[in-house]
């Protein structure tokens, strides 16, 4: 069984045990639907990391624990201390093995907000299974995927993790942070502008069974700019 299918199996079993049959069935329907057909538009965003940091958010809650998890060893250490990663603990191991980084905020021992990032193509492919272009060899970094537990939303936790990620990668000598935002996610688009980033293009992802296509193009097509490029194949 591939690592991807193994994660899906473990995720399904966890949902059935912790959230019940209805959640398990709904997750199964979503998985089957996306296994057959996906059509999504994304905005592509970037932010220079070699300038002064002008984004210093303060969460609206003070009693929290911030952790950077770079390895499975650190994941196990935190789990042994009682920190509950929930379903994210299942999905983390293969990503960490490939060099991805996990940024977490806990309220007590409960995971309130999680962000992923990658400094290599292999790690990014584990986080974001779309061939989005990041120039890792020349200081690019994939800022990545995020999720906040619903009851902890609007507390500024995600903004805090973004700032911590940017500061870390700047100290590592990275020059450009890149990420994508689903076109319908207006809140993330506003946050992109707030932190000093820019939306430089958009990408269309289409998947039909084992075939997939990713096409990128500038938000505003100008004279002299290259035409959209396309990468297609089995993913």
Image: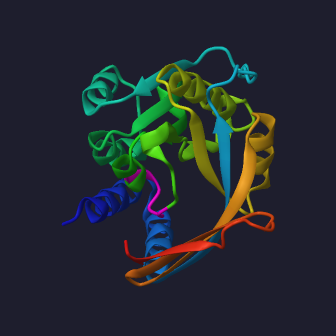
Q: Quadrant for residue 227, please give it.
A: bottom right
Q: Is residue 229 above or below residue 11?
A: below
Residue in front for this viewpoint, 35 or 173:
173
Residue in front for this viewpoint, 29 or 188:
188
Does the image show residue 117?
A: no
Verify whether residue 93 appears in magenta: no
| Furthest-front residue in this view | 224
Residue at (68% x, 32% y) in the render: 159
* Residue range of the region highlighted in magenta in the rendering: 126-131
Residue in front for this viewpoint, 118 or 115:
118
- The image position of residue 49, as x and y in percent, is 62, 29
- The image position of residue 179, as x and y in percent, is 60, 49
* Secondary structure mostly taken by the magenta-highlighted segment of the chain: loop
Does the image show residue 173?
A: yes
Image quarter in which the N terminus is found:
bottom left
Residue in front for this viewpoint, 136 or 44:
136
Residue at (33% x, 19% y) in the render: 81
Residue at (74% x, 52% y) in the render: 199
Task: Tell how many labels.
Answer: 0
| Furthest-top residue in this view | 62
In screen coordinates, is 30 left or right of 45?
left
- The image position of residue 167, as x and y in percent, is 58, 22
- The image position of residue 147, as x and y in percent, is 57, 45
Residue at (47% x, 67% y) in the render: 27
């Amino acid at each position: 069984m591939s690592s991807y299918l193994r994660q899906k199996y473990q995720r399904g079993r966890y949902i059935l045990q912790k959230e019940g049959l209805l959640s398990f069935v709904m997750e199964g329907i979503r998985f089957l639907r996306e296994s057959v057909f996906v059509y999504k538009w994304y905005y592509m965003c970037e932010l220079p990391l070699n300038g002064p940091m002008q984004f210093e958010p303060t969460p609206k809650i003070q009693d929290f624990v911030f952790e950077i998890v770079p390895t499975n060893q650190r994941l196990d250490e935190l789990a042994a201390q009682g920190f509950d990663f929930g379903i994210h603990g299942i999905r983390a191991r293969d990503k960490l093995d490939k060099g991805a980084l996990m940024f977490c905020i806990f309220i007590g021992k409960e995971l309130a907000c999680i962000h992923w990032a990658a400094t290599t193509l292999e790690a990014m492919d584990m986080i974001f299974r779309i061939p989005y272009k990041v120039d890792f060899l020349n200081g690019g970094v994939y800022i990545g995927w995020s999720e906040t537990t619903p009851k902890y939303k609007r507390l500024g936790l995600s903004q805090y993790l973004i700032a911590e990620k940017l500061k870390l990668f700047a100290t590592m000598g990275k020059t450009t942070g890149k990420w994508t935002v689903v076109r319908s996610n207006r809140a993330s688009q506003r946050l992109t502008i707030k932190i000093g980033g820019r939306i430089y293009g958009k990408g269309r992802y289409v998947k039909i069974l084992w075939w997939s296509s990713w096409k990128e193009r500038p938000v505003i097509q100008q004279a002299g700019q290259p035409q959209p490029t396309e990468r297609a194949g089995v993913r």
